[in-house]
Amino acid sequence: MNETELQAHATRLAKMTSMAANNFNIGLRTYYFALAILGWFINPWLFMALSAVVTLVLYRREFSSSTLKTLMMSDGHDAD
């Protein structure tokens, strides 16, 4: 294989891995919200509270995590 073929192969692998990770994350979010939906069987207010908690946890994990800060540093952005 020449350098161009290797680069194209690496690009395809990176894209496929990114797609797999995205689908995995969507599946996890679905599972978390499914747990919140179980609260509906007990009380609609519990369902709303659990949905808010799940949303807060997912927001913090996606937009306020130390992993995100580390990744932002690798792009040359300030982590603070």
Image (spheres, rainbow, N blue to C red):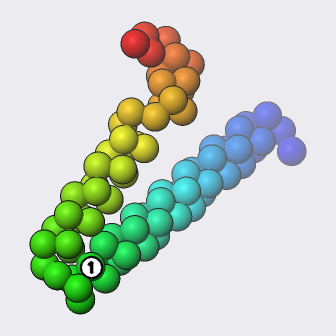
Q: Which amino acid lies under the numbered mark 1 shown in the image of this protein?
A: Gly
Q: Can residue 30 be spotted in the picture?
A: no
Identify the residue at horizontal 36%, vertical 37% (top origin). 63
Identify the residue at horizontal 23%, vertical 89% (top origin). 41
Q: Nearer the viewer, residue 34 or 76?
A: 34
Quarter in which the C terminus is drawn: top left
How many other residues sit within 10 Å of disc 1, few (<14), some (14-19) or many (≥20)?
A: some
Tell me residue 14's x, y (percent): 63, 47
Tell me residue 67's x, y (percent): 54, 33
Quarter of the image for residue 37 reads bottom left
Q: Nearer the viewer, residue 36 or 2?
A: 36
Q: Nearer the viewer, residue 74 or 11?
A: 74
Tell me residue 40's x, y (percent): 21, 83
Q: Which residue lies furthest to the bottom in this view?
A: 41
Quarter of the image for residue 1 reads top right
Circle 1 residue: 39
Identify the residue at horizontal 77%, vertical 42% (top origin). 6
Quarter of the image for residue 78 reads top left
- Element at label 1: helix
